[in-house]
Structure formats: structure tokens, C-alpha cells
Image (cartoon, rainbow, N blue to C red):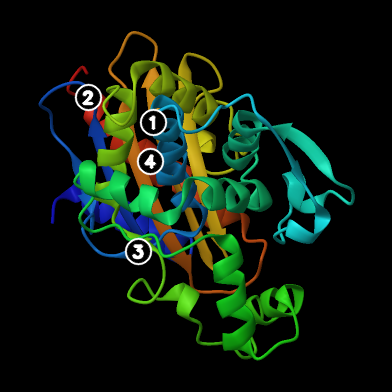
Amino acid sequence: MNELEREIRRTFADAGVHGRLHAVPLGGPSREVGVDPDEPVVMASVYKVPLLVAFCRAVDAGGLDPRERVTVDPAERTAGPSGLSVMRDPVTLSWRDLASSMITVSDNTAADVVLRRVGLAAVHEVLQDLDLAHTRVQGGTADVHRTLVADTATADTAAAFRALTSNDAAPSVRAYDPALDSATTARDMTRLLAAIWGDRAASPRRCAFARDLLGAQVWSHRLRSGFPPVGVRVAGKTGTLGAVRNEVGVVEFDGERPVAVAVFTRAARAEAVLPRADAVIGQAARLAVTDLRSGRL
């Protein structure tokens, strides 16, 4: 273990989380930074990135018109804090706007509607084609919520999440176990980002669309928080589930090669609001990216 890895591990420990990380410059041979980069981790909403690629491929193949209008009824709604998940009335929008909401605000309802349209088999095909051998997507957010309700023996999703964020009696749930739920590794996710940034995940036009959406993510309290507000662009996708806080993304300083970073954490405490657990994702990413930039990317 080198000094950088020890420093990143100390940073995770100081924030009260168990963390895994992988960072690698894109666009050519290079060094990499890793902290248990091949250890299986729970994806949470990070699964929406391979789902986005499956959506892009469906558009490329002509099987899905991104401008086609679709109406989402409240009865189809998946619980969540953003997007269509908080709407009370039917909403009509295009497929590509559903994909936009799925990524930019991590809209759970939009993601489940898109998943039903493109199919889980298409997501599995993405994983196979891009050699993401350690990544498994078992379903959408609604599927995770059903297991949470069952595992916490509660009446509904809201009650399940209250149980999940209690420090008095933390429940044992499948959603926390990468052997039982959708899972990946930090290295697999930087490989996926490299395929998107290298126009290999789908057509160049659709990869550009995916990059635009990831660059428009509204959440700045994790990966983005570790970097200066000017002179650097950060694109990413968060994932949150109780004590699990993740983000995968790409950091690009002006005039330098972009760096793909994947950070997965699980906090020792269960509270829904733990600012240090959010901020450590940016702090750990900054340590990794700074080291890689020292080689003049």
C-alpha cells in the first residue's frame, strides 16, 4: 500500500465511511489510483448510467424514437425525492426528456419507465459488450423498494426508509449486499465512463448526449465539491440508498485529459443526512486526481 492509498483510506475513515475508489485518465496509457477497486459494491442509482447507455443504443438501432411522447400516470410513480417521483398529476414528455430527468435529478420514476421500455436484457447486453464482467443489474428502483419493504417488515417504502435510517436497530437488507442486489466495482464504472467518453458505448452522437446529461447533473455536494468552481468541468451520477453514498464521474481541468473517477461508500451511521459522508467523495476524488495530474496529463 502506497502513501496515497493510505491517505485516501484515512480520509474515508475520518468521515466515518468504508470507501472504494478507482481513478484513471482517459485517452491513452496512464497510471491509475485505486482503493479496493475490484471489491464488489452496491450500485444504488449508479445503475442508471448503464441504463442510459442501453437507451442510447435503442435510439441508435431505430427501435425507439427519442422524441415520441409518453404519458406517465401517478399510478406508475416510484418513490423518490425528485422529478416525476414527486408529481401529483399525469405528465407527458418525450423519451429523451425522461432520460434527461433520470440522470440530471436522478428521477426514480423516469428511470423505471425507461427501463420498462428498453428492457433489462438490453442493459445486460451493454454490460457484456463493454466487458463489465463484475457488474450486475437486477432491476430498477421499484424492485429495490419492494425488497426494502419486505426486509424491514414495514407497510410501505416511506416506512422502510425510516427503518433504514435508524441507528437504534439497523436492519439487515438485501439492498446493502452486493451479492444479492445490483452491484459493480469501482474499476468497472471507470471502464464504462471511458467507453462513453471514447464514443464506444454507443454512436458518437448518443455518447455526446450521455456526456451532456452527466454534465448537467444538479447535485454538487459529492464529486463536484472536491474541485475548484472554475477551470474544471465535472460530470457525474450519484447513487444513494440509506448509508450508501456513491458517485461516478469524469473530472476535466482546462487543457488536460479528463479523469474518470468512481467512489463508493457506506457510512458507519445510518442517518439520512451526513454532510461529511457526502463531502468525502469529493475529497477522496481530489486526492486521486491531484496525484494523476502531477504527471502532467
Taking the image as shown, residue 56 lies to the left or right of residue 91, namely left
Q: Can the viewer see residue 226 in this picture?
A: no
Mark 2 or mark 1, which has the lower sequence index? Answer: 1
Q: CA distance from mark 4 to mark 3?
A: 17 Å
Q: Are marks 2 and 1 in contact (CB under 8 Å)?
A: no
Mark 3 or mark 1, which has the lower sequence index? Answer: 3
Mark 4 or mark 2, which has the lower sequence index? Answer: 4
**What is the residue that sits farthest to the top in this orientation?**
255
Q: CA distance from mark 2 to mark 1?
A: 17 Å
Q: Amino acid at mark 1?
A: Val
> Which residue is denoted by mark 1 in the rendering?
250
Of the two numbered discs 1 and 4 in the rendering, the one whose residue sits closer to the viewer:
1
Above or below: residue 107 compared with residue 70: below
At a point 61% along the width and 91% down the height, the residue shown is 169
Q: CA distance from mark 4 to mark 2?
A: 14 Å
> Which quarter of the rendering shows the N terminus?
bottom left
At a point 41% along the width and 65% down the height, the residue shown is 138
**What is the residue that sits farthest to the right in this orientation?**
89
How many numbered marks does the figure carry? 4
Q: Are marks 4 and 3 in contact (CB under 8 Å)?
A: no
Circle 3 crowding by C-alpha within 10 Å: few under 14, some 14–19, many from 20: many
Of the two numbered discs 4 and 2 in the rendering, the one whose residue sits closer to the viewer:
4
Taking the image as shown, residue 115 lies to the left or right of residue 74, namely left
Taking the image as shown, residue 128 lies to the left or right of residue 105, namely left
Circle 2 crowding by C-alpha within 10 Å: few under 14, some 14–19, many from 20: few
Mark 4 or mark 3, which has the lower sequence index? Answer: 3
Q: Quadrant of residue 243?
A: bottom right
Q: Quadrant of residue 12?
A: bottom left
> Which residue is denoted by mark 3 in the rendering?
41
